[in-house]
Amino acid sequence: MITTIDCIRFLLKQGLAFHGHDESKDSSNRGNFLELLRFLTDHNEDINVVTFDNAPGNLQMTSNEIKKEIVSCVAIETTNIIINEMGDVLFSLLINESHDISVKEQMVVVLRYVDKNGYVVERFIGIEHITSTTSISLKEALDRLFSKHGLSMSRLRGQGYDGASNMQVLVNVVGALAKRRVILQEKHAQAIIKALDDGELSSGRAFDKQKLLRLTEFYPNDFFPVDLVALETQLDVYIMDVSFDNNFSGIKGIGELARKLVETKKDQLYSLVYLLVTLPLILPVATATVERAFSAMNFVKNRLRN
């Protein structure tokens, strides 16, 4: 059984299909799973004596039903590890929808967050079948996914969509808004780039505390009035601290800064400053991860297998 599970884990990790075109005993190529299992039995007598015909008929562990159950268990275990790794951190969503080879609409969901070591990560958590690509249908599928994994909408701080046909409606609505929306977005981006990515938080040069404090206006649920007072004090102490700390010399970008703060445990000392650093990091900047998920699905669920 352990060998069977190891074979399944290997094929899943490599993104390879399990089945062959002809899996009969007379076939010269019975597919990746059976051929890999046969290879292991041919090179290890301990495995050979408990595999295929040497095992009882109900313990061969090679049926399609058994393989599907093991794959399902692996998927659940992997997703649980991701959710546990996240904990209660803030995150963003990356979503894309497309139809597979069987013309069924599928929605890929990826979570973007900063992990406990200060690294920005994007984790694929599932493909959901949807009946249509309307906003309501996508929302219902997303609600089911959140409920299934115990995720809270209150922790969501950003959303990125690509290819969702109903998003055109959203684009038209936003495009028709007053110019102040565009101006607000531009100022937001400029403030983040200038105050954070240029190194103001990491080195203290051209340092403008008021510009950094204005970033909190975009996150009223994360910075209450009492937090703003504490943040202002933290910024004063933080800038003096890192200015004399060689660990922070030569840092480029807020991603490296976040990792250095965790490494030196200053993320705990300056928790509000660290929050201010990580909020821009979790904002979606590309949807490549969800695109790769569909690319991988084309290998696993190809026309022949369908």
Image (cartoon, rainbow, N blue to C red):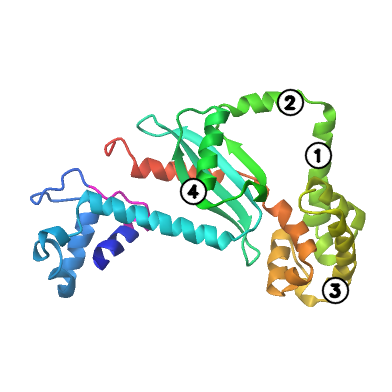
How many callouts does the rendering have? 4
Q: Secondary structure at mark 3?
A: helix
Q: Which residues are magenta?
A: 11-19
How packed mark 1 is, by other alpha carbons closer than 10 Å (few <14, some 14-19, many 20 or more), is few
Residue 46 screen position, x and y as percent: 17, 74
The residues tagged by marks 4 and 3 sit, at their Cα atoms, a distance apart of 43 Å
Q: Amino acid at mark 2?
A: Gly
Find residue 175 and name its label: 2
Q: Is residue 3 visible?
A: yes
The residue that label 4 is drawn on is 148
Tell me if label 4 and label 2 are in contact, CB under 8 Å. no
Which residue is the site of mark 1?
186
Sequence order check: which comes first, mark 2 or mark 3?
2
Quadrant hosting residue 33: bottom left
Would you name the residue on which mark 3 appears?
A: 241
| Residue type at tag 3 | Asp
Q: Amino acid at mark 4?
A: Lys
In terms of secondary structure, where does tag 4 sit? Answer: helix
Q: Tell me which residue sits at (87%, 64%) in the image.
A: 235
| Disc on the earlier residue, 3 or 1 | 1
The earlier-in-sequence mark between 4 and 3 is: 4
